[in-house]
Image (cartoon, coloured by chain):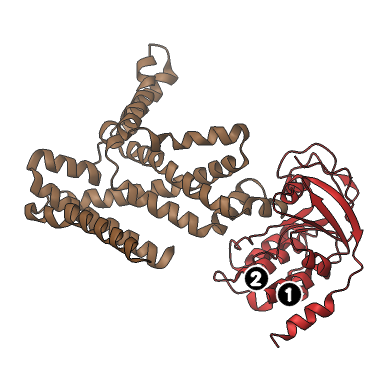
Amino acid sequence: MDLFSKAIVGATASVLALLLVVLPLVYLSPPPPGFVESIVLTAVFGLAASLLSLLPGLAAALAAQRGGFWGGIAQILYIPAVVPPTSVGVLLLASFSLPRAACFEGAHFLCGVAEFVSEHVINKPLGVLIAMVVMALPTAFSIFDGALKEERAEAFFRSLGFSGPRLLLLLLLSLRPAAVAAFVFSWIRSFGELGVLLIFASYPMTASIYIYQAWLNHGVGPAVGASLAVIAVAVAIAFVARRWLL
Amino acid sequence: MVQVERLEVNSVVAVVGRNGAGKTTLLDAVAGVINAVGRVSACGRDVSRLPPEKRGLAYVQSTPVDPPTRVDKFLKMVARRHGSDVEEVVRKLGIEALLTRRGGLSTGQRQLVNLAAALLTRPCAFLMDEPASHLDWINKKVFNDAVKALERPVLYVTHDPFEAMYVADVICIMERGRIMRCVENRTDITHIYKTAESLWA
């Protein structure tokens, strides 16, 4: 690495460390109660969402490699990454609110769906999971898409006679580094997911919602404390992944 | 566009061509990975309308694919599907030492495992897309010796005429998407390979 590149890396890292860690320490105060619960909740939902996004992400990447109609359809998975997260939240809320709007007397199925959505999805754990999976899909898709450009694993495994779910499983296992990267980056990303959750599923409270509430209700200090703790958790996950998994 | 009038593969046939000549496209079309117009026959049956997994054509890639599980488990999985014998193939390719490995295989080792898996499918023919291009010279020779001993039709694509002369029975030249000519390979360069190999002895 030459001196110029080192200077750029050093300057960028220093500015970020100063702005995101060192200077905010001036305001540091302990976060209000419920912080650990929000972190654990984010970790659990983020973990589940990252796992659930792997197979669809891989299947979409395969379709994108083949091109054609399904390759075009697969690009839809990028939508959550290219529109503002608040828009994704609004759109999810609108879609899931539709059964309630369409429910009328006698439409038992629609009213049943509307009841299920209000009891189990919007501002409920299932809603958090749905929102996180939606936001994790573009990460998994893009990482597998990159990996499949390097390796023509699909052509190899298909020629060995594999197809369907078994083919996907073999590809997932064979592309281990990409699968781990997709899983880890989606997981880390879930800690910062605010826009979509704020609108679609702000309860149970995940880390980003907790920080937002802490800032609104208790000021900068407790929000800084919680934010730095989240940074520590995310960096620890990234370090472990980089050191032992990737 | 790639247009091939007729190409019969009954032994090791090497298609030699420069970058962009259409060699990989030809293999993809034969394997069924891309749509193509025409007829592909394997083991005496028309497989043109079948998906790649049903054509009976084992397709070995230039960048070897990582085994999805421990080598022996992967090979057993393939063998179970095709009713073949892992031990026999492992012995033939001399990869006994790799069986308990899961990761950390070198490119050459991975390619031999890929070849073993391909062999276990008992294919009508092998399709090989520059399979030795990422291997060092010694591994290249090990791999190509294994190819020569397959005793199955092989359509072997390479940009290296010397490699083609070493491995193939028939050499076809491909240019701008067409097979220009095919000649029987009467040049034996085994002695040159042996001389080169002696450098490492």
**Amino acid at pointer 1:** Val
Q: In the shown orientation, is residue A85 left or right of residue A228?
A: right
**Amino acid at pointer 2:** Gly
Do the residues at discs 2 and 1 belong to one chain?
Answer: yes
Q: In the shown orientation, is residue A103 left or right of residue B193?
A: left
Nearer to us in this view, A138 or A17: A17
Q: In the image, residue A145 lies at what x, y percent?
A: 52, 47
Indicate the secondary structure of the residue bearing disc 2: helix
Q: Are circles 2 and 1 on residues that touch, CB within 8 Å?
A: yes
Q: Classify A155 as above or below B158.
A: above
- Cα separation, mark 2 vs mark 1, equals 9 Å
Question: For the point 29% across and 48% down, which residue is it?
Answer: A191
Q: Mark 1 points at which residue?
A: B142
Nearer to us in this view, B61 or A5: A5
| Residue A16 marker | none
Question: For the point 44% across and 50% down, which residue is it?
Answer: A51
Q: Name the residue under label 2.
A: B108
Quadrant assignment for the C terminus of chain A: bottom left
Question: For the point 26% across and 55% down, which residue is it?
Answer: A12
Nearer to us in this view, A70 or B11: B11
Q: In the image, residue A161 lies at what x, y percent?
A: 72, 52
Q: In the image, residue A221 lies at what x, y percent?
A: 8, 49
Q: The red chain is which one?
A: B
Q: Classify B128 as above or below B31.
A: below
Q: In the shown orientation, is residue A28 left or right of residue A42?
A: left
Residue A47 shows up from this direction: no
Q: In the shown orientation, is residue B173 left or right of residue A116?
A: right
Sort mark 2 into few (<14), some (14-19) or many (20+) by Cα contacts within 10 Å.
many
Q: Mark 2 lies on which chain?
A: B
Residue B191 shows up from this direction: yes
Q: Which chain is brown?
A: A
Quadrant assignment for the N terminus of chain A: bottom left
